Amino acid sequence: MELLNYMEKYKNIDLYSYFSQLTKEDVKRAISSRKPSIIDYLTLLSPIAGDFLEEMAQRAHTISLQNFGKSVLLYTPLYLSNYCVNLCSYCSFHSRNKIKRKKLNMDEIETEAKEISALGLKHILILTGESRKETPVEYIIEAVEVLKKYFDSISIEVYPLKEDEYARLIEVGVDGLTIYQEVYDEKVYNKVHIAGPKKEYSFRLEAPERACRAKIRGVNIGALLGLNDWRKEAFMTGVHADYLQNKYPEVEVSVSLPRIRPHVGMVSNYDVVEDKNLVQIMLATRIFLPRAGITISTRERKELRDNLVGLGVTKMSAGVSTEVGGHSSTEKTESQFDISDTRTVAEMKQMLLSKGYQPILKDWMHI
Amino acid sequence: MDNLIIGGIELKSRLFIGTGKYPNHKSMYEAIESCGTQVVTMALRRVDLDSKEDNIIEFIPKDCILLPNTSGARNAEEAVRIARLAKAMGCGNWIKIEVISDNKYLLPDNYETIKATEILAKEGFIVLPYMSPDLMAGKMLVDVGAAAVMPLGSPIGTNRGIRTKELVQIMIDEINAPIIVDAGIGRPSEAAEAMEMGAAAVLVNTAIATSGNPIQMAKAFSLAVEAGRIAYNAKLGATGSLAKASSPLTGFLGEGDK
């Protein structure tokens, strides 16, 4: 409840009324603030701050350099299953979509692991569709036991779990959790999550905190940009991340900035989030949360991803397939969404090196 | 420059270097070479022994002492496990204890650091603990076996200089072990300042790795550390609030007594 109450305070701020009163000086002050407040963060997301992207970029670059140096961590997702019991308007895996369903068995997982680890990657993010029946916690644990042999860091992106379930996964070797709220606005949330357990807004919202209580090393949160006004969603994401950072200082909090991508059964009435909007969110996030990880996935096209290096991004996916068995199997399934940057790990490494950045394949191991 | 002895090893250079945040391993190697450091710290959790291309140890000159650190440890138990793993991996028996459970400011937990230091010193490690500057905690670290103590100048990566100067000076004055200023030093002049204060050495990473030219910056730090140490040994002149002429105007007053 504490988180819900905390978020409630900010949820009711009339953003556009606040924005209408802002001056250029307010924006300049927020950019140069030693310790920006949540309201400074909101200022940086304002329309008027959109005229100060270069100034924000200079500050974000300096902060990124100080805190992370010239390095970017590379990881890849591994889709274990696309069985899903939810009906979400924005995702190919939803239960009524007539797509080929598949769940990898342990041998298949090991084959995928071998293929991926041969590329040198040591960090993996395992994903499932949201089905407790097809991919119960026991299945995920078994998969982690297999993957541990090949990877130093294993993160999960699965349906929200209870605290004791997160504790069990952490015990076997999971060190990171990615879970997107998708949309923080409850009305929109209710609308786009048409049916299924995902309709439970607060159980999902509190999932990262349950993992923090279970002593996870890192949590990665975010909104699926495009489902609602991006300024509102970016603001609430920042509020959520700040809450977690303050309450669980031992946990590494990261933010992802995924934009909706084409997928099977896609509808078209989304809020447009332009490149310059995405950049503004990233810069504001970096200035507000100097030490937070920021992830940019292969949803974004390569030219944009290349230009975001140095502005705040700390983690990038590479060599991505969003299909179950997509790294090794010849019998593939539909992808969760179409990726935009299809470069291999080697190509991503080369890109980073050419920009004077070090591609990091390993910055953690389970002790 | 007079030599520094830690764990029975005589060190000519009083500049310790970190290995994070460089644009690539080659520039890190060249920075290390250009400053002549003999002690290089690295996060053990970053070491990838499987990868020839990415294995950081391959890029650290063989004559340097490896100082693996326990970065990522959130309590004493994790730090001890990392230290033992480092030893088992062949990284030697020097270990820099970092116990940090605050990802926002990266400030060390002195209590857990003392616990880890005690366990590892008993096991024969040469333990260099990173700590928040505090006299009593520093004394305890030495009592439980720390070979040197590493208080921070300001939070990691901030390049804000020695904001903790008063506390670090007290530690230098009162603790009978080498005090190495670790974290926060952003400019060669600040490294020189630490050495003038009587610090035994300084550890620098961000200021070199993220500079425009890490090789030149490493060299600049090396010279600054040397200058600061020479100045300390030469004993700085006293400071005062009033101007003192180098040729006093009242010098004649004593002349009649001659």
Image: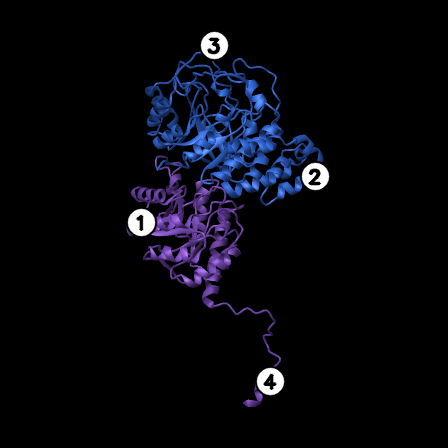
Chain colours: A blue, B purple
Q: Position of residue A287 (x, y in %)?
A: 58, 39
Callout 1 crowding tier (Cα within 10 Å): few <14, some 14–19, many ≥20: some
**Is B126 placed left or right of B257 in the picture?**
left
Q: What residue type is labelled 1?
A: Ile
In this view, the residue in front, A172 or B198, is A172
Q: What residue type is labelled 3?
A: Lys
On the image, numbered disc 4 is attached to which residue? Answer: B252
Q: Which of marks 1 and 3 is in front?
A: 1
Q: Classify B87 as above or below A178.
A: below
On the image, numbered disc 1 is attached to which residue? Answer: B119
Judging from the image, what secondary structure is the residue with disc 2 in?
Answer: helix
Q: How far apart are marks 4 and 3 (CA)?
A: 106 Å
Can residue A62 be seen here?
Answer: yes
Circle nearer the N terminus (3, 2): 2
Callout 2 crowding tier (Cα within 10 Å): few <14, some 14–19, many ≥20: few
Quadrant in the picture for residue B243: bottom right
Marks 1 and 4: CB-CB under 8 Å? no
Judging from the image, what secondary structure is the residue with disc 1 in?
Answer: helix
In this view, the residue in front, A93 or B161, is A93
In this view, the residue in front, A201 or B211, is A201
Q: Return the mark for residue A24.
A: 2
Q: Classify A157 as above or below A266.
A: below
Subunit ID for the residue under disc 1:
B
Q: Position of residue A318 (x, y in %)?
A: 46, 27
Marks 3 and 2: CB-CB under 8 Å? no
Q: Position of residue B233 (x, y in %)?
A: 45, 66
Quadrant in the picture for residue A132: top left
Circle nearer the N terminus (1, 4): 1
Dot 1 and dot 3 within a common chain: no
Quadrant in the picture for residue A14: top right
Q: Return the mark for residue A98.
A: 3
